[in-house]
Image (cartoon, rainbow, N blue to C red):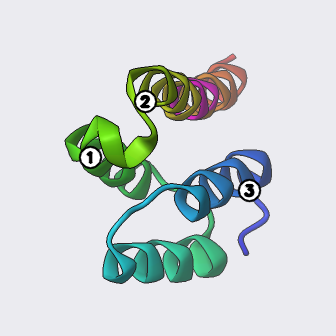
Amino acid sequence: MSGNNISETQRLIKFVEKLPFDDEDKKRWMEELHTNGFNGEIADEVHQKFLSLDSEKLGGDWARARDNMEITGILKQWRLSLASKNFRHSH
């Protein structure tokens, strides 16, 4: 696993593992995350697939809202750390 974004990578791995995604998608994402670590493309793809999941598969509307907050938080944290790195290098 890449040394960059370890926290976000681990959080996204846990998120992918616990949700009822397609086995093929899960396998591909997990391989990518373990090999290359977190990246925006994988995160966005996971988020889009999550949004297309049926609420009943997730355990209802409350579970869907909780899981949506979790994936949104992972994405926000990654974007914040990316922006912070870019800011430091520009000064």
Q: Which residue does the numbered mark 2 point to in the structure image?
A: 64
Q: Is residue 28 left or right of residue 55?
A: right
Q: Identify the residue at image location x=72%, y=23%.
A: 88
- For the residue pair 2 and 59, the one nearer the viewer reads as 59
State whether residue 56 is above or below residue 84: below
Q: Which residues are magenta?
A: 73-77
Name, please, the residue furthest toward the left: 52
Q: Position of residue 46 (x, y in %)?
A: 37, 52
Q: Quadrant of residue 10?
A: bottom right
Q: Earlier in the sequence, mark 2 or mark 1?
A: 1
Q: Main secondary structure of the magenta part?
A: helix
Q: Are marks 2 and 1 in contact (CB under 8 Å)?
A: yes
- For the residue pair 42 and 53, the one nearer the viewer reads as 53
State whether residue 27 is above or below residue 56: below
Q: CA distance from mark 3 to mark 1?
A: 22 Å
Q: Position of residue 64 (x, y in %)?
A: 43, 29
Select label 3 or label 1 by which is in front. Answer: 1
Secondary-structure class at tag 1: loop
Q: Is residue 20 left or right of residue 37?
A: left
- For the residue pair 18 and 57, the one nearer the viewer reads as 57
The amino acid type, in three-letter code, at marker 1 is Leu
Q: Identify the residue at image location x=68%, y=46%.
A: 8
Pointer 1 local density, CA inside 10 Å: few below 14, some 14–19, many at least 20: some
The amino acid type, in three-letter code, at marker 3 is Gln
The amino acid type, in three-letter code, at marker 2 is Arg
Q: Are marks 3 and 1 in contact (CB under 8 Å)?
A: no
Q: Which residue does the numbered mark 3 point to in the structure image?
A: 10
- For the residue pair 91 and 86, the one nearer the viewer reads as 86
Which numbered circle lies on residue 53? 1
Secondary-structure class at tag 3: helix
Q: Position of residue 17 (x, y in %)?
A: 59, 64
